[in-house]
Image (cartoon, rainbow, N blue to C red):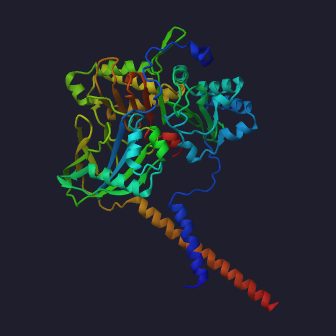
Amino acid sequence: MSRPFASRLLLSASVAALYACGGSTPSTPISVPAPPEGDNTYKCVTAAQKFLESLDGTQKSEVRFDYDDSAQRTRWSNLPTGGFQRKGVKLGSMTQTQQQATFELLATLLSAKGYQQVVDAVNADEVLKSTTTGGPFTFGRAEYYISILGTPSATSPWRVQFGGHHMALNATIVGADITLAPSLTGAQPAIYTANGVTIRPQGGEVDKSFELINALGPEQQQKAILGASPIDLVLGPGKDGKTLTSEGINASELTAGQQALLLALIQERVGLLNDEDTAVRMADIQSHLAETYLAWYGPVTPGSAAYFRVTGPTLFIEYSPQQMGGSAVNHTHAMYRDFANDYGAGYLE
Amino acid sequence: MRWEDRLPGSLLFALVLLLTAPAAAHPQHHGQSAYLTLGRDQVKLELDMSPGTLVAGQVARFIDADGDQHLSEVEQRAYIDALLEDLSLSVDGQALTLVLADARFPSASVLAAGEAQMNFTFTARLPALETGQHRMVFRNDHQFVESSYLAHVFSNEEALVIHEQTRDALYQQLSLEYELEPPVPGTLPAAPYARAGAILLGLVLLAALGGLVERMSARARRSSSSA
């Protein structure tokens, strides 16, 4: 074998191996059609630009990532600082104005109800901080991070990540479309009072889940209930790209009234997203209702610790109370995924 | 209500049900989550081990046998061997052999803190199975500290239909009734062929490019020598 040929072969093999192993070359921004006038995306872009303008030079370099930065895309967790290190800019390092801009950006991405749930979960961690001493973990509002992948635009994809303990919002914006898949929500404490008001960040969906399971007849419950005790999240952090086989009772075996309760439960989670994009998502979920399943682990007495899961061709929702030695209902984890569109992959197909 | 309205000061919060003080964020037992992916020829078993705050120290000490705060390769292998003894997998009553494909350990100190996972991937080759109904049983008896279990199945090939999944009361055992459908004639696994195609294309293009460069170099040499 002559040396030039050997060199060519080595070079060829290297390039081919890079391709075969999924290596990528620096990408150019993908262009997508501009949303129609008045679309919510324009508000999100404006809010994101305002947020970026509020940051100083160092913060700007810390908060920005390439849209196709796969390490940052998957850098999210339910764990607090000390158990998991996030990147971006954290609330604790921001001025009041910068924090305000952060939450204004979240408010454009989310519904009013979704925004409040996020705020309540962040505040729950502040409660946890005020009652926790020592240990390797750092709790509280200051430990929530925001990052932006890509450049806020109505005509190219970008992403906002907001995360901390029990929180990992991944909002991908592609033209007129926005998805929150995958996102993790939760709270600890999941029930607390502030200014005399009882706060339950995920109380709405918990109540609707018990309403649904108790609306089922004995035979239906037998199909839906897979175990007597609650389980942990199945497709939590680190489980991207996995599709779980469906279990439980098929929605086609439910009455119209029970289906309405199921859709109301799904809406509670999907409806974290702003109303415009939630409507699109719910229409898609409704069109696949006959292929959607409800699974339940645990007792059905309202207020007890029970896990539930809703799966469909494009939908994955689960809720898990956490056994921590105290009340499991006071520490919750929840996941939302879209098997066909996690991180907005489906928008770009 | 905006977020700042809810935060006049953390001390103003009155707690109702905060029953867990320093421990947070992670179950206190040894969480063991198993995920099976069934194929025609093999089964993949992914096992995520999450020792919680109450048992993490015990788990770390169990693995770090010499107590030097470092999980050596020998100690890691010893733990994997102990784990393998507690796992069983069978198809149609025939025991399958699990082989380690990947193992990830955190540092001893992080593991002991109760906020880290150990991740293991095993594979088992399946015997040649007829199309039709089959039964697979997975069981996890790994329990040297208080543990909780999960076992689920990931979707894989469309030629496999999972009919029923049943678990025991503690979720240590998962039984699957599934149907193996006949392979569709003329279909080949896409990824390996795409990859082979990429390699072949790379070889052809770069060999051609190399040849072009060599010809240009030779031409340049001839030009310079004639000059």
Image coordinates of residue B172 in percent, x first then y, are 26, 40
Dividing the image into 4 quarters, which one contains the C terminus of chain B? Answer: bottom right
Image coordinates of residue A87 in percent, x first then y, are 61, 39
**Left of A162 or right of it: where is A286?**
left
Residue at the left extreme? Answer: B93
Residue plotted at (66% across, 40% down): A64
Q: Nearer the viewer, residue A304 or A293?
A: A304
In this rendering, is residue B190 above or below A141? below
**Left of B134 or right of it: where is A336?**
right
Image coordinates of residue A263 in percent, x first then y, are 38, 24
Residue plotted at (44% across, 49% down): B105
Residue plotted at (29% across, 45% down): B142
Residue at the bottom extreme? Answer: B226
Q: Nearer the viewer, residue A315 or A291?
A: A315
Residue plotted at (22% across, 37% down): B168
Q: Quadrant of residue B185?
A: bottom left
**Left of A271 or right of it: where is A91?**
right
In this rendering, is residue A332 above or below B193? above
Could one spot residue A37 in this view of the protein? no
Image coordinates of residue A141 in percent, x first then y, are 59, 25
Residue at the top extreme? Answer: A196
